[in-house]
Image (cartoon, grey):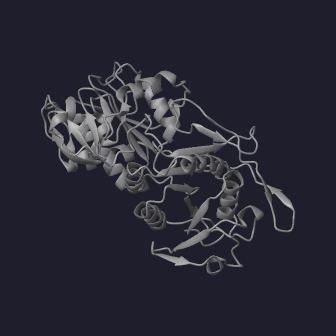
Amino acid sequence: MRIAIIDDGINPYLYSELANSPIEIQFVDIEGRITPKTVDEAIDPKVPLIHGTTTAAIIAKYSEDAEFIGLKIFHDQSMTANIKQLLAALNWCYKQKTPLVHMSIGSRAWVDYAPIRAIVAKMLKQRQVIVAAHSNIGEYTVPACIAGVYGVIADSSMQDNEYDITPIAANSRHIRASSAHSLSLPDGRVITTAISNSYAAPVITAKLHEHLTAHEPFSLPFVNYAKPDYLSTAYIVNPHKKEILSEHFFFKCLGEVSSMEEIEDREDDVINLPQGEITNSTGEPIWSEDNRQRLFEAYEYRGSRQECYVVNIYGNGIGALDFLCKLKKHFISEEYYCVGISDYAYSYLYGIEHIPSTTDKEIAIDYVHYLYNPDLIICFMENEKPPMLDDGKETDGYCVVLKEDTAFTQEDVVRAFRGIVEFWA
């Protein structure tokens, strides 16, 4: 079975473990154009292909009969690529329906989140399996932190192909694996890989390759994800005609219906608002609001609230949530790393971190800061009133108070953005 490795290429002459492995190379240039090359054409003596090659060797060591596709997006020793290259490589894997995709690369830029999430969601929808190493400095990184992706971190206490999957936790870095592997050089010497998330992730890829080979590609079952950011397309069942903000959906909505019976094509996911759950094409629940409840029940408060800039929006109902979505979008367009949180009903439809009504706001802010470490958190909690001191000054970060029954414009959003930036300048 084929495994795509998005990295710096694969040199089969470097390790004995790769001596008998079929290898294909796809060269991704800085404009995202992809052309096939032979292994020898892809080898540049000035830039040795070490990282992707070591990754492939670890996989080959622990899983037999792997066939590799090296999508070469790194072309110098800086080991950096641009978003065009990453998206092109992922799109190539999507169109080729490559069963198993492995990568060490990711992005911490929030402006990259939406396009990466979109293509990853399409891949997950056709049951491709994606393994990604988390950032070695612990920051939120996509695609490793997207629900449905097997994000992996190194555990220095493990050796060889040891790994551990922890039950649902408040952060998404829940798969640990060994990154200490002995690999053989052609001259008989043996080297041991460094402690790095990049060399832990191949253990999980090898294990998944074994499973898929024993069964069949695209056969892994769906799981209950902690956040529904894996969605690509979905129907919405809304029998009570609850007001929703369709312009802010983070996925493509195929239609809003009153009952499940109105959906003729059940090849897509369904968001059932009365049940507070998302089901797949077979009717199997793959996410529910209860997931979020359990997540926050498991979360341990870390006291990082004081390190975070928080904007509190005070207003009534869905209009305040609309303002949050638009303000968040404007901050992101200005290249700020911004996360929105709310306990308003169905706020998860808009890419907002949905907070269960039973969860304390300070816990929610602490969780979001711990997970994302953003520049800014924008918060709207239904029925919350602005905190005031006796002299009338606002005390809890920066407050945006929306007037009741007053429509706002994009100019109001920009004005709030400028006020917030100046407040903390």
Query: Residue 335 location, x and y as percent?
Result: 41, 55
Quadrant of the image containing the N terminus: bottom right
Quadrant assignment, res 40: bottom right
Q: Relative to 289, is 168 on the left or the right?
A: right
Q: Is residue 409 above or below residue 60?
A: above
| Residue closer to the observer: 211 or 415 | 211
Q: Identify which residue is drawn at 58% across, 68% down.
A: 74
Q: Residue furthest right?
A: 188
Using the rendered image of the protein, determine whether residue 367 is visible from the camera's viewpoint.
Answer: yes
The correct choice, above or below, for 73 with respect to 102 in the image is: below
Residue 394 visible to an observer of this rendering: no
Image point 43% across, 34% down: which residue?
224
Tell how many labels. 0
- Residues 259 and 391: in front is 259
* Left or right placement of residue 58 versus residue 83 in this view: right
110 sits to left or right of 174 = left
Q: Tell me where residue 121 appears, x and y as whole percent.
A: 39, 50
The residue at 21%/50% (across/down) is: 411
x and y percent of residue 409 in the render? 17, 47
371 and 323: which is toward the camera? 371
Which quadrant of the structure image shows residue 255?
A: top left
Residue 272 in percent (x, y) is at 25, 32
Q: Quadrant of residue 221?
A: top left
